[in-house]
Image (tube, rainbow, N blue to C red):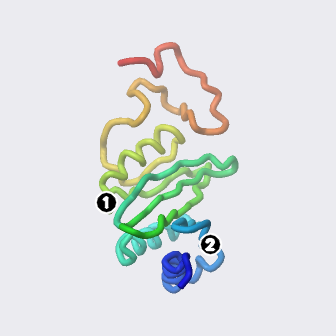
Amino acid sequence: MTVLMEEQAVKAELLKQFAFLKDAVTIARVRRIFVDVPLDRFREVFDHAAGRMGFNMLYTITGLDNGDDFGAIYHLGKDGCVALNLKVRIPKDKPVLRTVSDRFPAADIYEREICDLFGIAVEGLPPGNRYPLPDNWPDGEYPLRKDWKGNLPEDAGGDQ
């Protein structure tokens, strides 16, 4: 019995269900699996992991500016198991994701953060307040983009 038996079982289940992930699943270390999922197949893999595989916790969603494209990592977990990290790349010329708040209602806060900080649109995100930037933050200014210059008017970003 190896230390990585549970990780190997998760990987095997993903590969059994999704042959196209053959070279995309990496066991980084004990309790950490990373999967590079194509954007057009993301929701299918996400729903399988969250539904059939029992990954019933969304720890967070990490947004990234990779330079040539954007990325998002969905960190999923379940009791006593590995953390399953589903990574997706998002083209900069069409930065759009589909919400997962229908499966994990608390995802909306992470998705709003991705919208505010990277300018990645999230289709299906329910209406709500901005987060974490203030309501008077200028449109088109995304402070976690690598090319952001930080040009803000004096009154932007202050107390409301």
Comparing labels 2 and 1, the label whose residue is closer to the camera: 2
Q: What amino acid is found at the position of numbered circle 1 in the picture?
A: Asp
In the rendered image, which quarter is residue 26 located in? bottom right
Can residue 37 be spotted in the picture? no
Q: Is residue 7 above or below residue 138?
A: below
Q: Is residue 108 above or below residue 128?
A: below
Local secondary structure at mark 2 = loop
Can residue 47 be spotted in the picture? yes
Q: Is residue 88 left or right of residue 128?
A: right
Residue 102, disc: 1
Percent position of residue 106, x then y: 32, 51
Percent position of residue 135, x then y: 38, 27
N-terminal label among 2 and 1: 2
Q: Is residue 133 left or right of residue 145?
A: left
Give the quadrant of the C terminus. top left
Q: Are marks 2 and 1 in contact (CB under 8 Å)?
A: no
Q: CA distance from mark 2 to mark 1?
A: 26 Å
Query: Which residue is label 2 attached to?
Result: 24
Q: What amino acid is found at the position of numbered circle 2 in the picture?
A: Ala
Q: Nearer the viewer, residue 55 or 19?
A: 55
Percent position of residue 31, x then y: 51, 67
Q: Residue at x 58, y 48 (%)?
A: 64
In the rendered image, which quarter is residue 2 located in? bottom right
For the image, the number of numbered tags is 2
Q: Is residue 12 above or below residue 123?
A: below
Local secondary structure at mark 1 = loop
